Image (spheres, grey):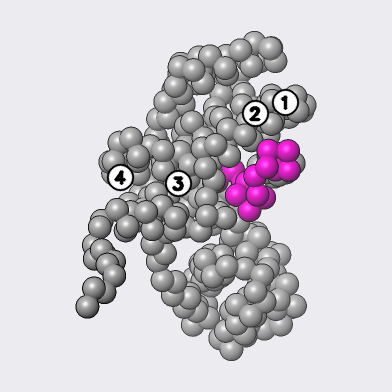
Amino acid sequence: MERRITQKKLQRFMEYLYEEEKSPATVQKYMRDITKLMEFARGQNLDKRKIIEYKEMLRDSKKYQLSSINSFLAAANSFFAFMGWQDLKVKTFRIQKKVFVPENKDLTKEEYRRLVRTAKEKGKMRLALILETICVTGIRISELAEITVSSVVKGMAVIYGKGKVRQILIPGELQKKLLYYIRKRNLNKGAVFQTSGKKAINRSNIWREMRALCEDAQVKEDKVFPHNLRHLFAKSFYQVEKDIAKLADVLGHSNIETTRIYIKTTSLEYRKQIEAMGLVAELREDTT
């Protein structure tokens, strides 16, 4: 039985994903991930041994975190299921849940403010407002196009994605800034953040512009990516509300376990919490 990945099969799989109402971002990621497997196979016929070899290659390359490798394998398994190649599906790597996040990945409020301030100082007002919009509303970078002129006027954006619809409040202060930006740009309709060609700005362009702020803002590059702004929103929201179910609704999560990832503290904060419990006996000198 021939089991080769071809462009024609990829096209059929892509059409299937759209019919399943997967978001454009999800479809694109699946296609990139399957293309990675296709390049590895080099036109060869696939069998279980080959897929295990692919899995081990990803792990041994040290280029990807296990969570990323698992997403590649999940895409491959989905493709195999679509093709009826069930026996090619492989298990993902088991990852022990981390109690805290490392400091070098945790974006603080002060660092976020420095990024916004630096963007303004460099005259990149659009970028500064994008950073604020993502961080203040908690939306995904892929949902930025849903911040439209009409939604800003209403003070409420309706986000369609991942099989659900949710409403996102645009707070008053942010709304004022966005309305001012809209007037300055003479925008009448469509996405607020557009390219010169009147299309919604691309996520890769935003990431590249964000990285260009790092040196002047004195923020490590490892911390600067759009999704980290969403994590900062989640942690800030939870510190005020202490309601993980409500936070899950705001973020658009179907599973609260996903939301828990967003509110993990850093190892330093975790250490402070443990020490504050006062369970270590007081150290005294031996008087005997």
Residue ID at (60%, 77%)? 59
- Is residue 15 a member of the stretch shown in magenta? no
- Residue to which mark 2 is pinned: 117
Q: Amino acid at mark 4?
A: Ile
Residue ID at (57%, 84%)? 52
- Is residue 215 a member of the stretch shown in magenta? yes
Q: Is residue 66 visible?
A: yes
Disc 3 and disc 2 in contact, CB within 8 angstroms: no
Disc 1 and disc 3 in contact, CB within 8 angstroms: no
- Residue to which mark 1 is pinned: 121
Of pointers 1 and 4, the one earlier in the residue sequence = 1
Query: What secondary structure is marked by label 3?
Result: loop
Disc 2 and disc 1 in contact, CB within 8 angstroms: yes
- Residue to which mark 3 is pinned: 162
Query: What secondary structure is marked by label 1?
Result: helix
- Residue to which mark 4 is pinned: 244
Q: From what the image shows, is residue 269 above or below residue 180?
A: below
Q: Amino acid at mark 2?
A: Arg
Q: Measured from the top left, where is residue 137 in percent x and y?
A: 47, 32
Q: Measured from the top left, where is residue 142 in percent x and y?
A: 57, 41
Of pointers 4 and 3, the one earlier in the residue sequence = 3
| Pick the front one: 263 or 9 | 263
| Pick the front one: 43 or 100 | 100
Disc 1 and disc 4 in contact, CB within 8 angstroms: no
Q: Residues within 10 Å of mark 1 (few under 14, many from 20)?
A: few
Q: Amino acid at mark 1?
A: Glu
Question: Would you identify the image quadrant in which residue 242 lies?
Answer: top left
The N terminus, quarter of image: bottom right
Measured Cα–Cα span from mark 3 to mark 2: 33 Å
Of pointers 3 and 2, the one earlier in the residue sequence = 2
Residue ID at (73%, 38%)? 216
Of pointers 1 and 3, the one earlier in the residue sequence = 1
